[in-house]
Image (tube, rainbow, N blue to C red):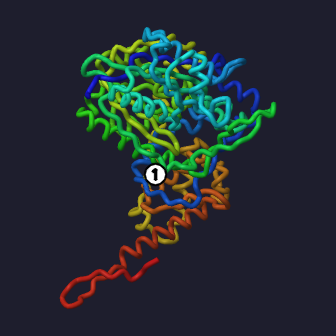
Amino acid sequence: MNWAVGIRSLAVSFPSVIRTNDYWCKKFPELIQQEKPRTARLSRSRVSTFSKNDLDIWSQEVAPYLNDPFRGNVERRVLGEGESSLTLEYRAAKDALHTAKLSPQKVELMIVASLFPKQIGLGNACYLAQKLELQCPAWNLESSCSSALVALHNAHALVQTGAYSNVLVVVSHIGSNTVDEEDTLSWSMGDAAGAFIVGLLKPNQGILSTKIINTAATCGAYLYELTTDTQGNPRIRTRTGENASMLAETAVNFVQTCCKDAIATAGVTLEQIDFFAFNTPTAWYASVCTQALGIDPERTINLYPQYANIGPVIPIANLYHAVLAGKIRENDLVLVYTNGAASTAAATVMRWGDVTLGTPPASPISVTQQQQKEHQKQKSSFLGKINGLSKAKLLMQEPEERQRIVEAYLLEWLSHTLQIPLAQLHPEQLLNSYLDSLIALMLKSQIESDLEVRVPMEKFFGEQNIVQLAELLLNQLVLANLIASESVCVDDSHQEQKREKLSF
């Protein structure tokens, strides 16, 4: 069977409290006063196996946010009094059913993805089925931030086979309750729920293809611990893990792999896609995706300043607002991409149907289109090149001059990136007083691109300073040059062979 199956209705549900950056400025001013907010350190021992170009894209898109202690966060919706993941899910589900003109008694299956529900260990599927008074099967499904697309993939397959004629999918993310407010990770966490109905559409509409891969390379990017709140109730606490760098290092590879395979299977091209709904767990992630695929940013949407990271609800909110804004119309080709840490990355190509929308959420209180335009101007003016040092140029200098040149190169990069006057930077100062995870990743990428040497991540932290890092870079550079130059040709029975005289 090849029935036209896809999304029939969309609804989103957000909590009542809109928390702006002023909340932390007033409650934790000492966090804001720090020169750069500290996130978890990158992995100290792993050697990157990913392309320099991949990290270049990530670093370029991160750059405009480095001087903002909130890293592009403006608002986030968080649970208020009497609200929970279940209340948000119930509201979204009722709205999706109402706008689809489908009664709860007509629902044949419900799939629920509750990321960080109130209770520990179980999702909300049965609780929500009870609240909606459903008579159908209801089960939990979880694939981190890709849960919505994985649930859509499952629902599509089940309707295609004729097992069910309609499926209600409900997804929620309660991030605010899983992080400590004094952890800067809390600045990026928002709460939300979304729901959609999957069923039969008009011919040639609906899901055309889906590509899903595992994201095992990002295992350990986040850590989850069981703790208790102030009332003694158990809860999950989220922290940034030691493998957080892999979220950046794999971002380009994952979006290219999923999107290009999904497009090829659908029999269309990137140019034919009318709208892209990308993952937006950070302010710059949508830009990373547009750069990775080489598409016009006008063909996507970025709701991060308005909602922050709302996990698996991201694709539902992006699609909802894109339709609301007129960016998606019936019969448009739409590509949706999501990426979940330590779970899956997924891309789905669909031809949009006559999708009905639920009630619009409350408007933001401080995010404006003018702010977005000003950010784009800032981004354009920020991105520039520093002194253009290269491996070839450095090796042309006298050996006694190289140390000074590399130190100056590192100091200039830090001054340019952190917007700190050179006079305030000192070669003997420990690197970790200047670097957080994002800046360290950018510096690593810049060095490997300019000087063509690998730098272990642990060399950016600990007791390392700029002088010592410069010495390390020169030693690696000279050693690599010796290995390349001292390969000699010897004649053995009239056959030329290369023999490497110096080895590790």
Q: Could you say where residue 41 lies in the image, as x and y percent from the top left?
A: 62, 50
Give the left or right position of residue 456, taking residue 6 as reference. right
Farthest residue, direction right: 231
Farthest residue, direction left: 494
Q: Which residue is mark 1?
A: 387
Write the residue at 51% across / 10% down: 359
Image position of 423 with respect to 364: above or below:
below
Give the left or right position of residue 452, taking residue 142 as reference. left
Q: Circle 1 sits in a helix, a strand or a loop, which is it?
A: loop
- Residue 133 image-quadrant placement: top right
Inspect the image, locate mark 1, and give the three-letter code of the amino acid beneath it: Asn
Does any portion of residue 373 appear in the rendered image? no
User: Front-most of 80 and 122?
Assistant: 122
Callout 1 crowding tier (Cα within 10 Å): few <14, some 14–19, many ≥20: few
Write the residue at 52% across / 51% down: 443
Q: Could you say where residue 57 lies in the image, as x and y percent from the top left?
A: 42, 43
Image position of 473 with respect to 421: above or below:
below
Q: Could you say where residue 205 lies in the image, as x and y percent from the top left?
A: 29, 21
Q: Quadrant of the N terminus?
A: top left
